[in-house]
Amino acid sequence: MAEPSRRGFLTYLVAAPTLAVATGLGTAGAAAAAPAVADAAARAPVPSLPATADLVDLGDILILAGAPTAHMLVLTVGEDGRVSFRLPREEVGQGLTTAVAMLVAEELDMAVDRIDIRLEDARPELLFGQFTGSSNSIRSLYGPVRHTAAAARARLVRAAAERWGIPASGLRTQDGAVVAPDGRSAPYGSLAAPAAARDLGAVTAAPKPESAHTLVGTPTSRIDARAMVTGKQRYTLDLDVPGAKPCMVRRPPTLGGTVRSVRNEAAVRAMPGVLDVVTLPTGVAVVAETFGQALDAKNKLDVAWGPGTVDGLSDDDIRARLKAAAAPLVDLPPLTRHIDAEFDFAFASHAPLETNSAVADVRADRATIWSGLKGPIVAQQTIAKELGLPVDKVTVHVVQAGGSFGRRLFFDAALEAARVSRRSGRPVRLMWSRVDDMRHGRMRPATHHRIRATYALGKVLSFDHRVAAVETDFRHGLGEILTATATKLPGGLGNAAFAQTLFHTTVKCPYHFGVTTQQLAEVPLKMPTASWRSVYSANTRGAEEIVVDELAAKLGKDPVDFRRACLKSPAQRAVLEKVAREGEWGRPMPAGHAQGVGYHEEYKSRTACLVEIDARDPAKPRVTKAVIAADVGRPINPRGLEAQLLGGLTDAISTTLRAGLHIDEGLPLEGSYSQFHYARQQDSPPDVRIFIMPATGEPGGAGELGVPAAVGAIANAYARATGTSPRRFPVNFDVDFTPFPR
């Protein structure tokens, strides 16, 4: 994308007493470091053509789609000197508000604790510009936020220049004030009103050059950390909405089931505290005075259920369908040396700490919704259509959420709450139980992988990866009603087209492996799926990294040396070499212990991961050490990036070793954290070191980055420690619990 199209920003002013602006690796490494030219040519890998994602990735597409409204950001300088910025993205724990506050503070030369980041209400005029996903927020906001803050700074400087009667070019900004050459200073608050005056004239502004940054790139603690650890952070169900009554929903015994009738509605209505019983397309809701009363009443409901969408299907049935959907590998000529491998990955819950929830107040002529939403525009538009109201009569407040990992791309709770509030005639506070969230919430689809690599004379000649997945639901579109409606088109024009686009603009093999192909086939089972962190890459690239280790073994090469030789660029090799050096790759390990390594890149960023595992008991393996290096282009907050990568590592440990969902007769068996075996503290490595590489260029994406390399590293370490290369994930996946009743 050309620079001017990304950085041409319009500013507008609000005439008020505030200013508002819109807008070396041991012997093996040493031996490989300086080979003779002829020897290098002989050992060079067979080049691969660029993949689609090498040329244009999903983030590029989202930035282009959002470009027409990228300037429509609002920054306000108050008379108290505090700066407020309205962020048109969702904060779900990824540290986005802190990174954006740092960008604003950097441009305004003031402390981060003087910046207030407020999540923007749904604004349909932003179109594609209010969608949180695909590691795109910082990539798309980096330029616009800096330009908006720079425009505010320029007007504050001009206002001070006019007050003092001196040229603006001689003034500077420092510590939230404009400073004159003679030492006079004017705090921003004292300049807010004159800076907002329309007669100030045209002001040109440009962000600071990156070389002048003093805050951006510096490890910074989260601006909301104290509130979170003291319990002061307000999530959806903490909001004080007058008259809003607790609400819970009794859900069907199989996915997608419907309500035929409620046999004991009168008896339930007579229970203590019960205010209403409302039948929904997704279940039966109970509104009560307390959540305890709502829970008791919904558990007492006797409902005649209609069939679900996947009744009778269990894991083995789904796995068989996936295997049948994966395109078969062609017959090879005799004596062709090759590796064939097949992998299965289970369904996985998003499992955010905060379960699905929403507050809704629906009146005859208007509605107000509060919820943690990554696509608030499509939520607003859909709810307005459901209620028969104009879009401008539905206000959707975006609330900071306690986790997402893709879950909050959908607005199930907000729509349910709006339906209940309208039918019940009162505001409601709807909460999904943990069991509901695990069993009926969104899940990462199960996948089957078929990989073939051919090789000869020490080189990989071809690499073919066929992926079959249960259909991922993209009916949220790009966060607004137009593309959301497009996903419902029949045949390959709708959801399937979105899936193929996302797959090919995110998944790529980073190695020169000759003729390289990656294909996706989706099985259209009607299950509540959604993009899970790293979407297709976690499983696809994880499986590929396992095969890379097996290729290295077949060719008699060290796994790190083999990757180094086949990676396509110095930047790729740099992160791999960093973890190999810092993690002491190749050091002696006791029996049952081993190291493993993996590499991944996506959204203009790249990472490598090295782990050590204790698998003396293969049924209870534990990752004991991890070293991660990441190159994200230009890091805004290295401390936040470290947290993102640590989260990706934990997701990989969980879903590679123990955490998954068993589908049994149309319903997941797991219903709590005690059953969905996400990693606990005892499963986490006590030794984790994360290295953020020096800044180059503009920011890349980071939210999805950390999982795939770690999946490969953990699986490879397990294989080296046990002598058995895993083919099904999670590796240990027993039903070691008594499921909750349906």
Image (tube, rainbow, N blue to C red):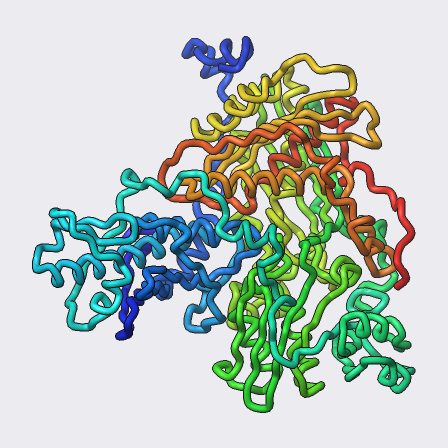
Residue for point 70% across, 86% down: 423
Measuring from the top left, give residue 438's x and y in whole percent.
76, 57
Residue 4 quadrant: bottom left
Check the picture and name the quadrant holding the C terminus.
bottom right
Measuring from the top left, give residue 191's x and y in whole percent.
23, 63
Q: Is residue 423 above or below residue 548?
A: below
Measuring from the top left, give residue 128's x and y in whole percent.
46, 65
Q: Is residue 428 above or below residue 598?
A: below
User: How many discs mark residues in the rendered view?
Assistant: 0
Residue for point 72% across, 26% down: 613
Could you tell whether 58 is left or right of 295 in the image?
Answer: left
Could you tell whether 189 is left or right of 293 in the image?
Answer: left
Residue 514 quadrant: top right
Q: Nearer the viewer, residue 39 or 683?
A: 683
Visible residue check, residue 619:
yes
Outermost residue on the bottom side: it is: 364
